[in-house]
């Protein structure tokens, strides 16, 4: 089986079976041309199609897809100190959250909620019905495990944004459509129990690229534990992923983010997309005149990439300041001799795009920061086909597992120094940067190691949808906002000036339309 995508077009009705409206003729007899709940869940093909509907839900443009009008993982990073919606006058999804002016009526606040719960509904439909299908017990258990893992991914998203939310594990009927919130801690505990219960039903290697494996479920478990400071649980899950001995870092970071290598052994969980013309492509890498020019990186992010000697730009003799870096005089000197991940992530002054050099503000495409995102850019696609690209999105990579394990070990305490640094050193070695011991030494305290891990995580996973949640869980959003505002005041060009309203910035409001339609649902306290 090449992929699930070939099944998607026949699944539109399947995802909404639990809420299907019926005509009189439909009530009188089974439809001869349509899928119905009474005739569907019978064969293994039905089950496979139902599972494909769950995977299809992950391609929602507010989850793991999405150009600037929606909000996929790239836009999530543009709501942080990694990037921004510079000069686009507020029309891009997430602009208001990025700038601290959002409300319960904001578009993204509602769309993200709907996307997550649509996927939860699809997963619950499969979990509730698959026991009716004539297939082996092992296959039933595996399909359930895949759906439970996807559902856990959605509740991770919801609890990291809205905090306490309705926790649904069964298909709702009209009589129980209204439901109250469940506290985040209870949801997290249930998710972790679910994943532990089903992980052994999953294969170590996938039957088709994009399907959830044991390593993927363990990685989701580890991420949930890490995000909720359950250090022992995170360490155990991540060590089991490594112990599977099926994952390794791909040798070339730049080539990792290409279609040719989306099936490599670093990718633990990827969202499958077909190529241009399939109508099953991704718009993450969509562009008009330059690589992802609607998505600008920040100078703050670019300064985080060290020089090739492993030292920050403020300490390295390899760093050349060049002229002032404004929209009128971008100097490529400052981007020479840097961590290779810089130019694999950002399109910076001095780089070329096909036969053209970078164009900044005043050119055909505007970038007030002089930086574009290039991580998902495919230069072989023209502007129209780039909105239906075949590049998979990587939800979880082995590099994240290594850095997350290092973080959990340090935060728990009682760690072995060499065990922690060896995890970071593997990630550094891939881009030929010196080891922690060589640059920072062998006697860093907990805070020193914490800073190294957080730095490495930022430059390794920029624009992969992790930064916002990292800033939330580390309570670092205020510092990030302050850095971006300082950048705006120093660099001599128009830049987003962001707003910070205190603790409410760490908790999204429950969408107003949900409050209005559900009498049992209360608004979050900070947003009342």
Image (cartoon, rainbow, N blue to C red):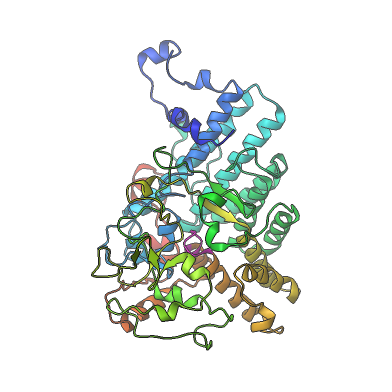
Residue 289 at what x, y percent from top left? 30, 58
Please tell me which residue lies in front, 361 or 192: 361
Please tell me which residue lies in front, 429 or 186: 429
Does the magenta-highlighted stretch encompass residue 462?
A: yes
At a point 37% along the width and 54% down the height, the residue shown is 109
The residue positioned farthest toward the top in the image shown: 28
State the quadrant of the N terminus: top right
Residue 54, relative to residue 180: is it above or below? above
Please tell me which residue lies in front, 482 or 86: 86
Direction from residue 175 to residue 105 in the image, left or right: left
* One can see residue 508 in this view: no
The residue positioned farthest toward the front in the image shown: 355
Question: Which portion, as a residue range, is magenta?
Answer: 461-468
Does the magenta-highlighted stretch encompass residue 490?
A: no
At a point 47% along the width and 33% down the height, the residue shown is 8
Residue 367 at what x, y percent from top left? 31, 68
Residue 89 at what x, y percent from top left? 25, 63
Question: Quadrant of residue 222 in the image?
Answer: bottom right
Question: Quadrant of residue 486 in the image?
Answer: bottom left
* One can see residue 25 in this view: yes
Question: Quadrant of residue 131 in the image?
Answer: top right
At a point 49% along the width and 57% down the height, the residue shown is 163
Direction from residue 105 to residue 214 in the image, left or right: right
Residue 313 at what x, y percent from top left? 50, 83
């Amino acid at each position: 089986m090449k992929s699930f995508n070939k099944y998607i077009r026949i699944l539109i009705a399947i995802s909404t079976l639990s809420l299907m409206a019926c005509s009189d003729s439909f009530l009188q007899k089974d439809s001869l041309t349509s899928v119905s709940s009474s005739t569907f869940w019978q064969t293994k093909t039905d089950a496979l199609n139902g599972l494909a509907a769950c995977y299809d839900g992950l391609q929602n443009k507010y989850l793991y897809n999405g150009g600037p009008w929606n909000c996929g993982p790239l836009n999530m990073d543009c709501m942080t100190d990694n990037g921004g919606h510079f000069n686009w006058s507020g029309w891009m999804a997430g602009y208001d959250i990025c700038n601290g002016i959002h409300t319960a009526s904001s578009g993204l606040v509602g769309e993200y909620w709907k996307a997550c719960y649509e996927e939860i509904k699809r997963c619950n439909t499969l979990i509730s019905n698959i026991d009716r299908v004539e297939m082996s017990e092992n296959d039933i258990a595996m399909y359930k495990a895949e759906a439970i893992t996807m559902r856990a991914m959605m509740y991770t998203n919801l609890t990291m944004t809205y905090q306490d939310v309705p926790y649904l594990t069964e298909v709702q009927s009209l009589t129980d459509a209204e439901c109250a919130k469940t506290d985040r801690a209870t949801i997290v505990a249930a998710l972790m129990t679910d994943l532990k219960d089903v992980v052994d039903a999953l294969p170590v290697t996938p039957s088709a690229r994009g399907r959830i494996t044991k390593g993927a479920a363990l990685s989701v478990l580890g991420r949930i534990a890490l995000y909720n400071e359950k250090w022992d649980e995170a360490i155990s899950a991540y060590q089991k992923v490594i112990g599977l001995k099926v994952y390794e870092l791909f040798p070339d970071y730049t080539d990792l983010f290409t279609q040719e290598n989306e099936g490599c052994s670093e990718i633990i969980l990827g969202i499958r997309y077909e190529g241009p013309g399939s109508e099953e492509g991704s718009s993450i890498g969509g562009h008009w005149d330059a690589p992802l020019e609607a998505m600008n990186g920040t100078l703050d992010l670019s300064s985080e990439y060290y020089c090739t000697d492993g030292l920050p730009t403020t300490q390295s003799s390899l760093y050349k300041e060049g002229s002032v870096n404004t929209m009128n005089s971008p100097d490529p000197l400052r981007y020479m001799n840097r961590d290779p991940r810089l130019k694999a992530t950002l399109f910076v002054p001095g780089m070329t795009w096909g036969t053209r050099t970078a164009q900044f503000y005043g050119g055909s495409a505007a970038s007030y920061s002089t930086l574009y995102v290039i991580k998902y850019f495919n230069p072989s696609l023209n502007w129209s086909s780039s909105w239906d690209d075949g590049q998979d999105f990587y939800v979880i990579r082995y590099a994240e597992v290594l850095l997350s394990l290092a973080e959990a070990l340090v935060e728990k305490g009682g760690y072995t120094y060499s065990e922690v640094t060896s995890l970071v050193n593997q990630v550094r070695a891939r881009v030929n940067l010196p080891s922690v011991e060589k640059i920072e030494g062998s006697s860093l305290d907990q805070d020193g190691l914490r800073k190294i891990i957080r730095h490495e995580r930022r430059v390794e996973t920029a624009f992969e949808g992790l930064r916002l949640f990292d800033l939330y869980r580390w309570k670092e959003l205020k510092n990030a906002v302050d850095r971006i505002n300082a950048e705006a005041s120093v660099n001599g060009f128009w830049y987003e000036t962001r707003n910070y309203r205190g603790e409410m910035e760490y908790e999204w409001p429950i969408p107003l339309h949900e409050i209005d339609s559900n009498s049992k649902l209360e608004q979050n306290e900070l947003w009342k």
